[in-house]
Image (cartoon, helix red, strand yellow):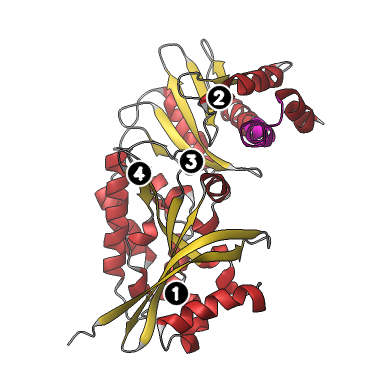
Amino acid sequence: MYAIAITENHQINTDLTLHDSSQTPVTVRAIALTLTKQNNELIECRLTFCVNPQLYQRIDTIALFNLKPDVRNPLSSGKFLSEPDITIETSLKPDFLPLLAEHTINIDETAKYILNLCQEQPDNKILCTESWLGLSVKQQQESDEIGYRTLWSYISLENLSQISTSGEGIAEGIVNFFKDWTEANLSVKTQKSATKMLEGIDKFLIELADINPDNITQKIEANFPSSPTDGSIFEAIINFFTVDDWPFVQLPGQPALQIPFQGENGKWNCYARARSEQNQFVFYSICPVNAPENKRLDVAEFITRANSGMMIGNFELDFTDGEISYKTSIDVEGDRLSFGLIQRLVYANVTMMDEYLPGIMSVIYGNVSPEDAIAQVES
């Protein structure tokens, strides 16, 4: 006989101040708290809150609430706008649920306890952004609701809190996550990238239940088999990112890879492309934000100033949609693309994007002049 899970909801609608791992405050507008119990035992606690797009940019850039690129499905139906607010649903990590156990007689008491922590115990682990797993991020726009789900919403966190949980259901959830992801964005995934995307997840799952990560990986690889590649340049590219231990996915039907990168000043996607007919290797870092239309001339001036004197690579701006990128490339006609050549181009590229990203952000969001922004970066 199965135990029935009971869910309670409580509307909050008040400010809640959390903190990130560096103890920097993160103030959100708490909307709702949801508790799920089974046999009077708390098995899940969800917190839903709103943030303005500027705060979301910070959350997105440094992956607060565990919103890391490799656990997200692609953004649906467009891009987040500069308004209205963005709604984020999160779930408290199961290993922190015992901290709430004695305050869950009723949901009103739980909500009051969490809100009082801000005044009485501001450094409490429950108030740390890293103690919460982002489940979904949404923005209601005039035409439609856009957003994305994360891996955590696929694997039923309420089940993870029970030590008897079967790993089969969790593996199925992860497979469904990958299927939705590849259907929306990528149709070809190598065994290497599937395994890399599971790093960190395995440890988290093992700590919560008796789960064999090999079984999960095998099930995923069975659904996403590796595919052969053609062309010596592309083979050299794949070899480099495999040996140098970078996570990557292959774009469908193209000699190109998509690679997430985390720098000191932010995170973004990179693209490595082989142009076999031209005997060229091209590598791009894509800025995590696009320049708004009213800021594109300022950004154009900023990157023009930045490009002056650049020896390897250059910034580019697409005036159509405001995309900002940094490009490095090499022509290897009559030669071969060596590991060392790829390494120099890739590391020079991500270093430049990371160095100039704060300047780009200050021009877009801080109303800093391009000249002053360059001076701040290059000083």
| Label at residue 146 | 4
Q: Earlier in the sequence, mark 2 or mark 4?
A: 4
Type of amino acid at the residue the image marks with label 4: Ile
Separation of marks 2 and 4 at Cα, in angstroms: 23 Å
Q: Is residue 248 magenta?
A: no
> Residue 182 location, x and y as percent?
30, 42
Going 34% across and 39% down the picture, which residue do you hit? 142
Q: Earlier in the sequence, mark 3 or mark 2?
A: 3
Going 29% across and 80% down the picture, which residue do you hit? 6
> Residue 45 location, x and y as percent?
42, 73
Separation of marks 3 and 1 at Cα, in angstroms: 33 Å
Type of amino acid at the residue the image marks with label 1: Pro
Magenta region: 352-369
Q: Is residue 121 visible?
A: no
* Residue 153, picture quadrant: bottom left
- Side of 146 relative to 237 (left or right): left
Going 51% across and 22% down the picture, which residue do you hit? 282
In the depicted view, which residue is nearer to us: 86 or 308?
86
Q: Earlier in the sequence, mark 3 or mark 4?
A: 4
**Tag 1's secondary structure?**
helix
Q: Are marks 3 and 2 in contact (CB under 8 Å)?
A: no
